[in-house]
Image: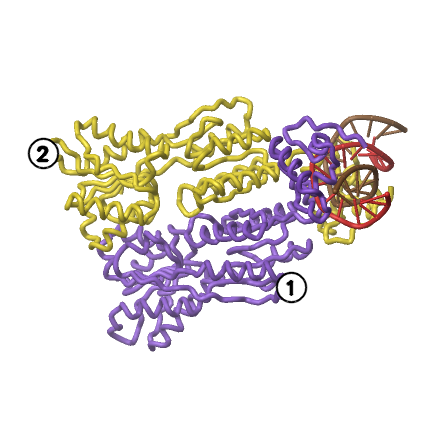
Chain colours: A purple, B yellow, C red, D brown
Amino acid sequence: MQKKISNSKHPTIYDLAELTNTSASTVGSVLNGTWRKRRISVKLAEKILDVAKEKGYSPNMQARALRKERSGIVGMILPMYDNRYFSSIAESFEQKAREMGFFPIVTCTRRDPDLELEAARSMLNHRIEYLICTGATDPDKIANLCKASGTQTINIDLPGSESVSIISDNFSGAINLTTDIISRVPPPSKNNKSRILFIGGKENDHNTKERMRGFREAHKHFNLTIDDNYIRPCGYAGYKTEQSFDQFIKETKQLPSGIFVNSTISLEGIMNWFRREGIESLDNVALGCFDWDPFAALMGKNTAMVRQNVPAMMDLLFQFLKNPNEQEHQIHQINPDIIRA
Amino acid sequence: MQKKISNSKHPTIYDLAELTNTSASTVGSVLNGTWRKRRISVKLAEKILDVAKEKGYSPNMQARALRKERSGIVGMILPMYDNRYFSSIAESFEQKAREMGFFPIVTCTRRDPDLELEAARSMLNHRIEYLICTGATDPDKIANLCKASGTQTINIDLPGSESVSIISDNFSGAINLTTDIISRVPPPSKNNKSRILFIGGKENDHNTKERMRGFREAHKHFNLTIDDNYIRPCGYAGYKTEQSFDQFIKETKQLPSGIFVNSTISLEGIMNWFRREGIESLDNVALGCFDWDPFAALMGKNTAMVRQNVPAMMDLLFQFLKNPNEQEHQIHQINPDIIRA
DNA sequence: CTGAAAGCGCTTACAG
DNA sequence: CTGAAAGCGCTTACAG
C-alpha cells in the first residue's frame, strides 16, 4: 500500500523506508532495537540509522504507546517543589525513573485535594504506568481512582490504606527530636511541668499526629507533663504559626523554654516573630524542627533539625517498582536523621 | 465492522457505543465536546456521559494526540527544584499551563548539558508543543534540536540567540544591590579602594557576567576601584564558594567590608565559613545576595537580597505562548526587586 | 440527527 | 533475511 510522504517536520518510518529502499517493518525494528531478533544485517541497520539521524528522526511516543498499550511513563504528584524534602524527592525520582528507562512526569498539587485529583486524572488519561502520591491529602481517594484503571499507586510521606506506603518514622523521629530539646532546656522548676512548645501542622494529618505522639512519649519518659496550650497544631502556613505563637505568648506571658516546630514553613513563622520582637532572644530557646533546611540549620547554635532520609525512601520505592508483584498494603517506615547545630 | 469488546481496564469509545446502542463517532464526539456541532440530542449526550462515568471512561491521550497530531503537552526543563527561584518558576508554569488547557511536564536537568539534551529529546519524542528552557547551559543547542522538529522554544533566566528569552535584568539588579552594599560600608580609608567582595557564579555564564558588570558600574559611580582578587566567580557550588572565600581571607588577611554573593547556594558556602569561624563576625559585613531565600533573609540585620520577579516573567512567557506569531529572537529583561532586612 | 470509514505512526505476529 | 498487513483508540471529513 502506497503511503504518502509526510510533509511535516517529522519523518516517519515510512519516509525512511522509502529513502532506504526497505520497508516500514525493517525500519521500525532497526529504530526500536528489535532488529537483531529479525536477523537484519548490520550493514542495513547502520544505513537506516544513518539516514534516520540525518533526517532528524524522532520516534513518535504517542504512536508507540498506543500500539504497545504501554506508555513507559511514570507519574508523581507532590505538594510543592519549594522545600528541601520534596524537591529532593522529585529530583531523585526523576533520576531513578530515567535510569529504569521510564519517562518521569512530576507535578505539584499544592495540598489542594481537587488539584490532586485533577492531576491524577490527567496522568491516567496519559496512561502512566505508576502513580506515586507524595504527601497527598487523601491518598486513598486517588488510589481508588487508579485502581479502577489498573494503575499501581505507591504513597510517599503520607500513608494510605489502599497501597504500599513509604514514610518517615515520625514517631521515633519526634521522640529523638523532643529528647534532644529536653536535654538543652533547664529542668522545670515546679510540678515537672514542661515548658516546651509543639507548634505547626494539622491535628488530623497523619504525620502531625505521630509527631505529637512522639512529643508526648518523650515527655512521659522524663516524667514531664504538658499543658494543653503547649500543643498547637495551627496549620502549616508560616503566618498561621506566627499568629498562633503570638497568641501563645500573650496567654503565657513568657517565652517557652524550647520549641518543637513541625516543619520548615512553620519555622519561618517562628523566625519572623523573633525577628519582629528582637532576634537575640532566640538563643535562649532550645529549637527543634521536624524538617531540614540548610539556612535554618545555620541560624543560632541552639537548634536541632530532623532530616528525612530521602535516599532510603527512594531506594525502597524503586524496589517496589521493580518488583510489582510482592506488594502488600503495608506501611514502611524509614528512620530520619537528627542534625545538631 | 464488528470491534471486539476490549477486556482491559480501559473501556474505549467502541465499548461505550455498544453499551449505548450508538456509534463510536457519536460517543467520541460527545466525549470530546464536539457533539453540539453534530446536533446530537442533549438526552443522548447525557446518556452517553452517564455510561462513560459509570464505566470510569478515561480518554486515551496517546490515541487523541496521534490522531490530532497535537499532543497538548508543554515541556519545561530547569536546573533544579531546590531553590525559591526555580521552584516558583516551575509551580507557576504548571498552573498557568493547566489554565490554558495544556498538560505541563517539567523536569530538572541539574545543569548537566548532556541531561538537558537527553531530556529535551525525550520531550520531543513525546511531541511537546513548546519547550521552555530555564537556566539551560546551552540554550541554542537545544533550540536547534527543537527547530529541526518545528517545536517552539523560549528561554527563561539564561538567554539564547535562537529564540525569545525572558530573563532578569541582572545588570541593573546588580547595580542596585551593589549600591545598597556600598551604602552600608564605611568609606575606604585610602586610594578609594573598595573592600567589597564579589563571589560565586561562573565567569562565562551570562548572568554572572552581567552582575559583575553591574558590580563594577556601581563602583565606578562612586569612584571606587576594585582589586582583581575581590572578584571571584568560583562556581555555584557552596563548597567552592567556601573554599574561595577561605583562600581570599588567607590572601588579604582581613574580612571584606561587604560581600556580593551571586546566589543562595553560594551564600550557603559563606554562611558555613562564618559558622566555622564564629558567626558573630558576620554582623560587621554588609551582605548582599543576588537571589532570595526566606531563611537567609532572616539571618543578620546587615543583609539585602535580590528577588527576581517570577510573576512578571511568567506573565510574559504565557503572553508569548498565547501569541506564537509575534516572536522575535529578542531578550526581554525584567527588573528584579531588592529586599532589605 | 447519526454512522461507516480512513488514517495518525508505530509494533509485531505471520508468511515467505 | 525481509515485507504486507492488522490494529492500538481516537477524530473528523464525508455521506446520508
Please tell me which residue lies in front, B306 or B150. B150
Query: Quarter holding the C terminus of chain B?
Result: top left
B252 versus A232 height, above or below: above
- In the rendered structure, which amino acid carries the disc numbered 1? Asn
B269 shown above or below A263: above
Give residue B2's mark: none
Q: What separation in Å lies between label 1 and label 2 (alpha carbons)?
A: 75 Å
Residue A64: percent from the left, percent from the top?
68, 43
The reply to whether residue A278 is in sight is: no
Tell me the subunit letter for badge 1: A
Q: Where is residue A332 drawn, in percent x and y?
A: 52, 66
- Identify the residue position indicated by label 1 in the image: A325
Q: How many marks?
A: 2
Local SS, label 2: loop
Identify the residue at image location x=27%, y=35%: B177
Residue depicted at 40% across the width and 41% down the height: B85
Q: Where does the image place residue A221, in percent across and percent down from the top left? A: 36, 77
The residue where tag 2 is placed is B190
Going by the image, does A256 lie left or right of B221?
A: right
Location of the N terminus of chain B by quadrant is top right
**Residue density around tag 1, few if under 14, some if 14–19, many if 20 or more, within 10 Å:** few
Label 1 sits on a secondary structure element that is: loop
What crowding class fits label 2: few (fewer than 14 Cα within 10 Å), some (14-19), or many (20 or more)? few
Chain at tag 2: B
Q: Is residue A202 left or right of residue A226?
A: right
